[in-house]
Amino acid sequence: MTKAIIIVFLIFSILSCTDKNQNESTTAKLEYLKSENDSLRKIVADINTKYVFDSITIRDIPSYKNTYELNSKVSGEIVFVGYNINKKTNVIFVDSSSYNPKKLYNPDTLKLNNGGFFYETDLNADRIYLKGIIETQGEYGKGYEGFYNTVIGTNKN
């Protein structure tokens, strides 16, 4: 009978050691997953403070001062333009707008083409005024909304 009690005691002690090792392994794994989760939260928090774009294009914008005459200097600017290919990125021209609440009068949404919103208008007066809203919002990161105003005048010689 003593041998049987010793064998049962040994079996329980072996099983309890195995459970203890599994508990330590599970605890270590949980600690690792918690630290990984905290790290991912920091990355997501950092991303949400940035502007995040789906795509990018490069634009070469020549200077308006270029004369394009023989032996003249030509200058320009190369810019990287990020944009989102979703229905939350828009340039909308309006006749007028109000701000509180936001209301657009006679809106005309321009179409996105390779990161650019092209427009064409008639210069039918000495000065014409273009007004609009530029807005973008991606699934991640910061959104942007700004008002656009410009004046185009005729060249008087």
Image (cartoon, grey):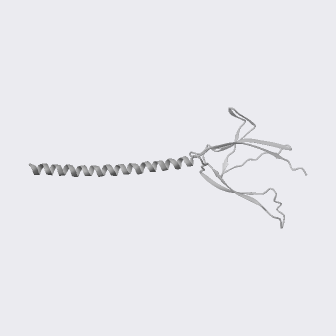
Occupied quadrant, residue 63: bottom right
The residue closer to the viewer here, 80 or 69, is 80
What is the count of numbered marks? 0
Q: Position of residue 128 (x, y in %)?
A: 81, 43
Tell me which residue sits at (23%, 50%) in the image.
Answer: 15
Tell me which residue sits at (27%, 49%) in the image.
Answer: 19
Residue at the left extreme, as displayed: 1
Q: Position of residue 42 (x, y in %)?
A: 52, 48
The residue closer to the viewer here, 48 or 112, is 48
Residue at the right extreme, as displayed: 157
Occupied quadrant, residue 68: bottom right
Q: Position of residue 151 (x, y in %)?
A: 80, 44
Q: Is residue 135 positioned above or below 72 on the image?
A: above
Residue at the bottom extreme, as displayed: 71
Q: Position of residue 157 (x, y in %)?
A: 91, 52
The residue closer to the viewer here, 81 or 44, is 44
Tell me which residue sits at (33%, 50%) in the image.
Answer: 24
